[in-house]
Amino acid sequence: VNASAVALDQRLFQLETLYEIGRECASVRSAPEVLEVILSMLMGAFGATRGLAFIGDHHGQVEAICERGDPSWTGASIDRYLRGNAGLDAAGLEVWAPLRVDELTHGAAALGPKLSGAAYSSADQQLFEAIVANAHTYLHNVKLVDDLARKVRALGVVNEIAVGMATHPTTRRLHRFLLERLASAVHADRAMLGLCGADGQLALAACHPADGTGLAADGVKQHEMVVPIRFGPDAIGTLSLTRGSAFSAEERALVELLANQCAVILENSRLFESFLAQQQEHFRLRGMLEQYLAPSVAERLIRGETSPTLEGRRVPVSVLMVDIRGSTRLINQVEPEFMVHLLNDYLGRMTDILFSYEGTVDKFQGDALLGFFGAPEAHSDDAVRAVRAAVQMQSAFAELTRAWTPRHPACASLGIGVGVTSGEVVLGNIGSTRRIEHTVIGPPVNLAARLTARAPAGTVHLDACTWAAAAQALALRSQRPRHIRAKGFSELVPVYRLRVGC
Amino acid sequence: MANELQTRLREEPRLVVLELSGDLTTFAHEPLMRAYREAAQTGTDNILLNLAGVGYLNSAGIAAIIGVIGEARRADQRVLLTGLTPHYQTVFEMMGLTTYAPVFASEDAARDAIAAA
């Protein structure tokens, strides 16, 4: 009776191990710690002098191991066991049982001889197996926590990369930053980023370290992990990481997670670069157009908010030409530098006025400016705009002469003549392959030149078309036109003169 | 929250007393082995583990004591135990530990046994 009571006590003590394992595992967070608890408990429960517990994957890679006592088992037997090629058969082991964690991870717990020298009974074996089978829950739990921690770590790296993106705006710097963080996250010696070009071919985009360090010496075995970077259904590149030791499934999962995030960041970066290129092109184009067009018209053309007049088509426009009277005489009296200053002042002011009415500069010819209204953007009141611009030019020029005169008295005698005509012209590129000019051609252009040449300082000459289109809108006093003979025109040309009181 | 194992070493002419306090569980293994090795370096033949201050002891703690007994045997040293509650004395007997580490009611009883040997 006494012996039976002792045996029952012993079983009770061993069964308490089931509860004790759970109690201690509640305070541990890693697989090696759980293995240590399981093995210690088993050794104590059965009075064993040696113990071994391990888990790993089906490729023989050990994830965690705990050994107690005087281990005499070899790594080879553990490797064989993990690969599923054999049971756990090693010297010094008397009892063992498999530890199943999940589909990817398994292992075993084993005990050596008892301190008492007694053999393990079949009841011992059964109880041992039951305790080990029960213990897998704790390993499974820490793996889940581990998995969560890995994801949190990965999110940390992703967050770091996302934050870093703000300080690494250029693609090259971003690539280097991504690789540096990835290599650091999995302790890789070398990281490479391959990206697919427009032709779909993979090309090396960046390498970390960039100076070639991290390359293994000849003959040194390197383990490589290559993970595709996918954006939606498309593979846009690869991440390749190398180091001396093999990468675990967990590390691969981390890099895969990061690769997904990288895809978004790389795509954003690509879009950002493309946006920058578009912006550069936009500003280049705008800068070019603003030499000829009012900034507002240039902007509307670039944005596609207005359709430009098609090249080579006849278009109704109002042509304006302005020229200085008395400039030839002045050139002989003043320093050339002052003349350049004067011309720039005058042409700049005339251009501003033209643009303020959304007119277009055709060309500068010496001290004359040729502009037009109605292309590339037509307005219903282009003739009115042209006349208003011409009148404003006269007023503006009077102000300019007042400003110049103190520097040179001869400036007081300067004035401008302006000619405005309206009619159909052809808008197009004229010239050779070496030099080309965007211009308007047609009788209104020639007539504007003739009217301007005949316009005394302080006057604006209008042709009959312009007068008809603008006189009423501008409430111009009615007048009889003068008729002039203009070169290139077979008939007399009626001219309306506006004198601008300055 | 577990109480970490604390050890105090007392050297006497024919033995070294290792006073243990706190919990003797899985995580006591390392500190206990360290304390044992420190005691063993004194060159003593007898190491007395006094468990009177141990508040909690489980299978893992027993495994740790088995570890000490195993190392002591290989070093030709003798491990003696005292301060065990009647329950754990029974458990130690069941496990066969008392064959290799005799249990005494007090430190004095252990000293007497060493003197008589």
Image: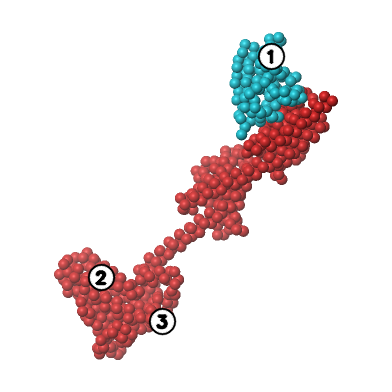
Chain colours: A red, B cyan
Q: Which mark is residue A179?
A: none
Q: Nearer the viewer, mark 2 or mark 3?
A: 2
Using the rendered image of the protein, determine whether residue A276 is visible from the camera's viewpoint: yes
Q: Quadrant of residue A355?
A: bottom left
Secondary structure at badge 2 equals: helix
Structural distance between the alpha carbons of marks 2 and 3: 31 Å
The residue located at (53%, 49%) in the rendering is A159
A283 up-or-down from A241: above or below: below
Query: Could you say which is closer to the camera, residue A350 or residue A493?
Result: A350
Farthest residue toward the right?
Answer: A1
| Amino acid type indicated by mark 3 | Arg
Left or right side of B74 for A154: left
Q: Residues within 10 Å of mark 2 (few under 14, many from 20)?
A: many
Residue A281 screen position, x and y as percent: 43, 63
Residues at marks 3 and 1, CA–CA distance in whole angstroms: 125 Å
Q: Chain of mark 3?
A: A
Nearer to the camera, B19 or A349: B19
In the rendering, at what x and y percent does residue B36 appear?
63, 21
Q: Is residue A416 left or right of residue A357?
A: left
Image position of A384 (left or right of A328): right
Q: Which residue is mark 2?
A: A346
Residue annotated with mark 1:
B109
The tag earlier along the polypeptide, 2 or 3, is: 3
Q: Nearer the viewer, residue A39 or B80?
A: B80
